[in-house]
Image (cartoon, grey):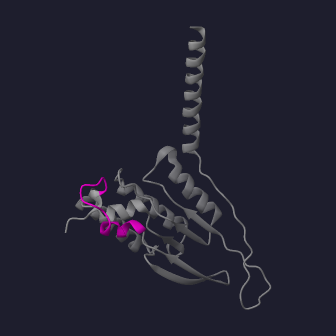
Amino acid sequence: MEILYIVLGLIVVLAIITIIYNIWDNRRVSITRITRKIRSKNGDKEDKEITICQISDLHDCNDYGKDQKIIDIIAEEKPDLVFCTGDFMDFYKNELEFSISFMRRLAEAVPANRIYYIVGNHEARMKMCSSKEKNMMIARFWKELENLGIHYLKNEKDEIKINGVNLRIIGFKDFQEYYPKYIVKGSKYQHLIRKW
């Protein structure tokens, strides 16, 4: 009987540690710095420096003010470019106003013409699902990005010059936008087939 209490005690302690770790992990914002030397093709020997910030997978998440922490870091760092690589919206949560608010605050922290957005799988699902409400939400989100002057790249490229360096930025549609061709009626993915 004593061993049973010890095992149960260990399980409870591990559960508490797991909960504490998850709370801590959800509150933090991770920054990874990568430095690469950029040399121009024209033989210029001077190294150039560009600061790029990449953000992804917010999933309509405003947990513990993480969204404002991200905006504050970006405002402080002043990156030359910001790449938003999808899943700012969440197919299941439907918090459109949060996503729009975040993009507006981001466009205040960094000039909107320096922000690039590409679709993630959640935005792709919202676009192609049979729910008119979700279709309208994602259309409104794209319209808001356009109104803010944020570049939304969908199978497109943009060529720009930043700090004397020529860059080619390419954005692709999410592969899920092509799923309806392959989804079988009656499968668990049937909700992704738009009813025309």
Query: Which residue is at 34% across, 53% downward?
Result: 94
Residue ranking furthest to the bottom? 42
Query: Which residue is at 60% across, 21% downward?
Result: 10
Picture quarter with the C terminus = bottom left
Label tally: 0
Where residue 60 sits: x, y (%)?
Answer: 42, 53
Picture quarter with the N terminus = top right
Query: Which residue is at 29% across, 60% downward?
Result: 192
Residue 165 highlighted magenta (yes or no): no
Residue ranking furthest to the top? 1
Where residue 151 sits: x, y (%)?
Answer: 46, 75
Where residue 148 sits: x, y (%)?
Answer: 42, 71
Query: Which residue is at 39% across, 73% downward?
Result: 147
Which portion, as a residue range, is magenta? 175-189
Q: Which of 186 and 43 is in front in this view?
A: 186
Residue 48 lies left or right of residue 80; in this view the side is right
**Residue 168 higher or lower than 118, as above or below:** below
Residue ranking furthest to the right? 45
Q: Quadrant of residue 26?
A: top right
Q: Quadrant of residue 97?
A: bottom left
Where residue 118 sits: x, y (%)?
Answer: 46, 69
Would you say residue 100 is visible in this rendering? no
Residue 185 highlighted magenta (yes or no): yes
Would you say residue 172 is visible in this rendering? yes
